[in-house]
Image (cartoon, rainbow, N blue to C red):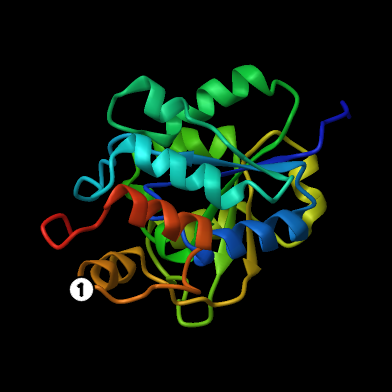
Amino acid sequence: MYHLHQAVGILGGTFDPIHFGHLRMALELHNAMDLAEVRFVPCYQPVHRKLPSASPEQRLAMVKKAIATEPHFHVDAQEIRRKDPSFMIDTLIELRKELTNTPLCLLLGIDAFLHFSSWHRWEEIINLSHLIVAHRPQYQLPHTGIIADLVKERLQTEVSAIYTSLGGYILLHPVTSLDISATDIRKQIAMGKNPRYLLPESVYDYIQQQGIYSITRV
């Protein structure tokens, strides 16, 4: 068997704003899967939800501030640089060119995973990367349908599985359940409430400096 490099985690999202739910999930999955790093990929223009309140540049800046003190976290701005609707398949194709002998692990909350079959070219995504699903007790996997069949076919229980191929497997891992919502954070800020302890202080300071999430923008 050819030698594979230490796996890299990929966490995409609008990060509008990034908060401790994102960061804690990334850290726990980084540790559990023994990843070399986690790359945060803020999207330019999401295709499954309305446009973010903060600009792409502001969201990129917030991610940079949020992860500045964690040496295993890095930001990948390729989706913002492309300035096109953001599809994860395009990002993974570019990463595969860069990381030719490295397993890629797409980190997903289970809520996102339950809608994975609606993603653009999702069959190709799971062949380019492993899916690491952050499991929370309030969500249950379906017993029938595309996702159920995918889990039955691809599920692995040992972390070592991600080092047997560059992609193709699904691993479930429980994470601390932090019920933090970016939507709620935006609403709190718009109403003049203090969202401290839901997101990094550096991010909140930047939001205040930039005047993001005023009442007219939520």
Q: Which corner quadrant holds the N terminus?
A: top right
Q: Position of residue 205 (x, y in %)?
A: 44, 57
Q: Looking at the image, which residue is at 48% across and 30% down? A: 77
Of residues 130 and 147, the one drawn nearer to the viewer in this rendering: 130
Q: Residue at x 44, y 31 (%)?
A: 89
Q: Residue furthest left?
A: 216
Dot 1, crowdedness within 10 Å: few (<14), some or many (≥20)?
few
Side of 144 where 134 appears, left or right: right
Badge 1 marks a residue whose secondary structure is loop
- Viewer-proximal residue, 203 or 9? 203
Q: How many dots with numbers?
A: 1
Can residue 156 be spotted in the picture? Answer: yes
According to the image, label 1 marks what residue? 191
Question: Residue at position x 15%, y 55% from top?
Answer: 217
Residue 158, image x, y percentages = 78, 59
Question: Which is nearer the eye, 122 or 212?
Answer: 212
Kindly indicate the quadrant of the structure image that contains residue 99: top right
Does 90 sit above or below residue 58?
above
The answer to which of 61 and 50 lies nearer the viewer is: 61
Q: Amino acid at mark 1?
A: Met
Residue 202 x/y as whole percent: 51, 56
Residue 45 location in percent, x, y? Answer: 28, 36
Q: Residue furthest top?
A: 97
Q: Is residue 3 left or right of residue 54?
A: right
For image coordinates 24% across by 73% down, the residue present is 192
Quadrant of the rendered image containing residue 176: bottom right
Let me know if residue 12 appears in the view. Answer: no
Single out the residue that lies furthest toward the front: 209
Q: Is residue 164 left or right of residue 150?
A: right
